Image (spheres, grey):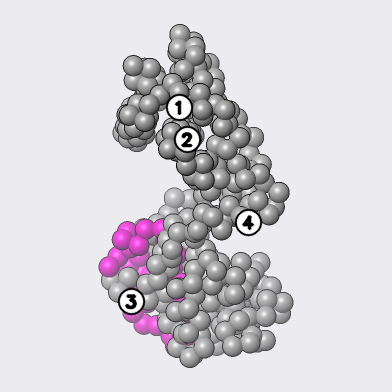
Amino acid sequence: MNSWEEMFQQQPIVSKMLTNSIKKKRISHAYLLYGDKGTGKYALAQLVAKSIFCKNKEGYEPCGTCLDCKRINSGNHPDLHIIHPDGASIKTDQIAHLKKEFTYTGLESNKKVYIIEHADKMTDNAANRLLKFLEEPSQETTAVLLTENSQSLLSTIRSRCQILALMPLNSKQLEQKLIETGITEGNARILTNFTRNLDEALDKSKDTWFAQARKLVVQLVEMLQNNRDEVPIFVHTQWMAHFKEKTQLQEGLDLLLVWFRDVIHYHMDDSSSIVFLHQMEKLEQASMYWSIQDITKHLQTIMEAKRKLEQNVHPQLVIEQLTLQIQR
């Protein structure tokens, strides 16, 4: 996302607050942007940096074409410092290095900006060191902390930041954007159930693993209706062979949840809410096989299976129990 105009469509409230600050030249010394994955946290941080460094901006809108804007896009601006987790966490030496960098004068101006992605992943020592940095802010320094879980940050860090909550993306807007790239409406609806990030959705649309996962979900449902004796073999030879990791298995169960919700929508003649649009005939068959009461029980059973996976119950045992309960 290269402009505030675009960002206003995605995050109107936060964009209005930030652009007002930029227009009035009252940029905070520290911001904490929090929201779900794909809500535009990093793009917002980049726009703040561009609005600070761009020499050709009109009002608050950076030009997007000057050397400063281009270097910010590539992550190579000399006065913009970006910290990512080193492995599973952001470590003390990363914050120490950042503080050292900020003792030097800016290479091209006195302004400096730093962005900390996944700020909630700082170790305790790193967080305490950052806190000391925030307690003595330079007038020309702007910090932008990004997180999906603001409550995991020290309350003392939160208190020194202007906290801005990002709204979840509008699924219909994302669906339309996907359709504009050539993705079918049915596939777009499925993708928006798994991400609110356009780039991630496009990547997922090309993912052969995800395409096969969808096919296996439909096959499993058909077997549960028509070939119940073959379900255990199918689970062992195909389902578990494809959904090898716990995260993959959770995604498979999420697809199964979407399928059974679609059956309820079909029962209620609510086609506008159906996700598996390309499987209408199979949804009709499923609606004739299972009542709404049946489906409601199955949805609860799938949710319980997801909880068991999180509790590290053996994956194959979880799926075998799930299919048996659906068959009752």
Callout 1–callout 3 Cβ contact below 8 Å: no
Q: Residue furthest top?
A: 229
- The percent position of residue 80, horizontal first and vertical second, equals 56, 74
Three-letter amino acid code at disc 3? Arg
- The percent position of residue 316, horizontal first and vertical second, equals 41, 21
Residue 266's mark? Answer: 2
Q: Residue furthest left?
A: 155
Q: Nearer the viewer, residue 296 or 243?
A: 296
Q: Which numbered disc, 4 or 3, marks the residue closer to the eye?
A: 4
Residue 160's mark? Answer: 3
The residue lying at 47 percent from left, 55 percent from top is: 37
Q: Which numbered disc, 1 or 3, marks the residue closer to the eye?
A: 1
Is 128 in the magenta? yes
Q: Secondary structure at mark 4?
A: helix
Which segment did they paint magenta?
Answer: 127-155
Q: Residues within 10 Å of mark 3 (few under 14, many from 20)?
A: some
- The percent position of residue 240, horizontal first and vertical second, equals 49, 22
Q: Nearer the viewer, residue 16 or 33?
A: 16
Distance of label 1 from label 3 (alpha carbons): 55 Å
Q: Residue furthest front?
A: 269
Distance of label 2 from label 3 (alpha carbons): 51 Å
